[in-house]
Amino acid sequence: MRNQIEFEVSGKYALFTDPLTKIGGEKFSYQVPTYQALKGIVESIYWKPTIIWYIHEVRIMNVIQTESKGIRPIEYNGGNTLAYYTYLKDVKYRVRAYFDFNPHREDLVYDRNENKHHNIAKRSVQAGGRRDIFLGTRECQGYVEPCDFNEGKGFYDEVPEVDFGHMVHGISYPDETGRPERETRLWPVKMERGIIRFIRPEACELTRKTGEGVAKIFGSENMESVDQLHEELFAEGEKA
Amino acid sequence: MSWLANLSKTYDNHTDAIGNFEKKRNGREYALIPISHTTQSAHIEVILNGKGEFLRAKVIEKEEGSTIIPCTEAAASRTSAPVPYPLFDKLMYVAGDYEQYVGEVKKHTPHANYLEQLRTWCTSAYSNRKVESVYQYLQKGTLIADLVEYKVLWTDMQGKLLDKWVQEEGDESKEKPAIFKVIASDQSSAFVRFAVQIPGDTEPRLWRDREVQQSFIDFYNEQLAETDLCYVTGEQLPYADKHASRIRNSGDKTKLISANDSSGFTFRGRFRTSRDAASVSYEVSQKAHNALKWLIDRQSFTLDGKVFLVWGTDRLEVPDPAEDLFDYLKEEEDDSSAGDMAHREHALEVRKALSGFRYDGEYKSNVVIMTLDAATPGRLSIVYYRDMNRELFMNQLQHWHETCFWRHRYRKNENDKYVAFTGAPATKDIAFAAYGSRASDKVVKGLLERMLPCIVDGRPIPIDIVRSAISRASNPVGMEPWEWEKTLSIACALVNKTKEKEGFRVSLNKQLDDRNYLFGRMLAIADVLERRALGREEKRATNAVRYMNAFAQRPGRTWSIIQSNLQPYQARMGTDARYYNGLLDEVGSMLKPEDFTDAPLSGLYLLGFYSQRHDLYTKKDKGDTTQGQDSEQDNDQDDTEE
């Protein structure tokens, strides 16, 4: 596929919180990552407002296992609380993702250089990503490596089909939809021979509005140019 | 599939079990409850006729009190503010003459609310003839008066309900009325259920009548107007505002799904209300929670509040991974040389034992393993969840029982006699072997959860558990003999599992020249020799056993102590000791000189010890003829009381 990258992401633990258990506070992970979680990982590898990442497919390499830990979440009003969080244990995923240009960012039209972004993205995968990688939540550190999607032996390679029922696909934000609202998308998840093939966000039929907002506008009022910053940092006469 | 979807699927697969009461081992009844219903213990049963006239009433025995009652969402989570159940409820709600007999109810009007709710049901399209009779009768408002007249409830001099029964002095003839035996607080909190007798109708008990139940389900379903996208089914369905509590037991207030974020930050930030964050349909929530409660009552194991549950979504019965297969495996004959069973034969036994749980065409069938626990009193958490193909599950279980095995002698058969069996120990027994029989429930439940992945996923057993069992098995002086034997054989099973690739067996491996194994064998020979020299009456521990702990740490030095202590016994036995001395020499000569050091022994020495000892006690026909009066059974299990 055009503008595609392939990588493997692995970690000791992962927590793709099932929203039903999140609202009470005893977080319990979904069995497999959501589209949005993988999108977040790809955006940590490389992202610019010019582009939108799409996840094509994910291959579940390791057997799906859970392990719980006793957690002391932060009580914002003081005091103590305890919870059991249930994590996925020893996860390894192979991901195929590709990018398109964000049609809602007219101001960045000049930056729409496919080859440039694709090459940066590929180099970023080689480097293990530009930012920290998380598997669902902040405490689950993940590690990215370049890989061949089809290589290696996965635990579910021989399993014809596993049905995960309905899961959250992701959340649509105004900067990518152009609509002034936030929508949660659901979709029925099926894993075939270890591979989940995602549908595009706009193909999700099950959506519900879960808030409103608008895309933030960036301009000279709320951004500082590099030259200006340089002037400030290095007073006259000093050459950096 | 997600846990909620699996549970609600289990409910759908077992609709024929809805409302059928079964008895638990402790005599308590349980059932798969229909949706929009819950259970309560009733105290009083009122029998009416079809015209809504009072026929009779009785006090219900405690064991029969379990009653399926219709229930609205609001009533299910009622607290101090009175919200009536739709049909059966406490006197305060159902009796129109409650104030007359008990006292004024402040602020609220429970009876009026109750009647109004019942009226809506009776005037709806889903009304039921028998429910109408109840409505007709309760409108009269004479329930307590009727019950007092029928001598179910009792009043005092002022005509109020008695708070508690006081035996009159000198009047022993009057027995305590039944109502005071079944109710913990005073009479006014009695829970009432109704039966309506109509000629030609076979089921007068409204709480067992499927038609009445269905009529309420349909009626209530219509009341639920607000729909939302269900996160489990993906359909637009009536939305569940509140979810079930009392999941683990009737006194349990914890919920699996709850939402309370007025102060912390569980979902706020991105979402304003819990509804924004997630929504579940009423039907799925009801089905899943009712199925879960039923499964927990039916086939779970609970320890210190932690619930261990394994079930099949299509066929409920699944072998429990935490149990040994003793009840299915063939017991060994006590004095034969079984126990040398070849590995292939053992594998065959396991396969046979598990075959009862295998079915054809289980390709699509799944097994769910779920463990629940609560960190705080309000919320229940799923601490372990595994949804796996049944075939795969059975294969993993089979592998576990085929590899983590040893010969055990701590289980009793139906004649209450200890018998030997070869197999994997139950997880609970592993916990006691690793942490001692006085280990607290908190520690044990942690181990049970940690062992689950070892069994169902074939992960290695956590090394601390194995080590702990080895070091306890190396310290026989600290335990009763029976407990040590049990710990020893379980430690052997664990060691055997960690050395899975080498494929050790209970029967002695005479070729193996591993240092640990040989040291273990020597210790066993010393033990058997001394035991024999001591004779049957002498129960004290042998030097070998007493020094076992030190031996495991510093085998070289300790062996010379054991050997010098052995000399008097060798002398006492005279020529009878010849076989043992020869054996000692033989094993000793296999030990390479550079291996005869003080480096601590690995757990493998326990296998050498056990196998050699077992070999000496069972192979009576071989070797010299002077031995054979003693057997293992005599010295390890005589003083066995747990």
Image (cartoon, coloured by chain):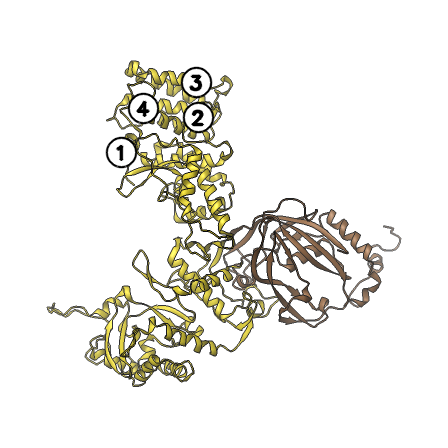
Would you name the residue on which mark 4 appears?
A: B620
The kind of residue tagged 3 is Gly
Would you name the residue on which mark 2 appears?
A: B509
Q: Is residue B97 left or right of residue A211?
A: left
Upstream in sequence: badge 4 or badge 2? 2
Q: Is residue B202 left or right of residue A236?
A: left
Would you name the residue on which mark 3 appears?
A: B588
Would you name the residue on which mark 1 appears?
A: B638
Above or below: residue B555 compared with residue B416: above
Q: Is residue B634 visible?
A: yes
Above or below: residue B599 compared with residue B327: above
Closer mark to the observer between disc 4 and disc 1: 4
Closer mark to the observer between disc 2 and disc 3: 2
Upstream in sequence: badge 2 or badge 1? 2
Q: Secondary structure at mark 4?
A: loop
Structural distance between the alpha carbons of marks 3 and 1: 32 Å
Q: Colour of chain A?
A: brown
Tell me whether circle 3 and circle 1 mark residues in contact (CB < 8 Å): no
**Chain to which mark 3 belongs:** B
Q: Which mark is residue B225?
A: none
**Chain to which mark 2 belongs:** B
Q: Secondary structure at mark 3?
A: helix
Q: Nearer the viewer, residue A67 or A155?
A: A155
| Coordinates of residue B115 in the picture (x, y in percent) | 36, 82
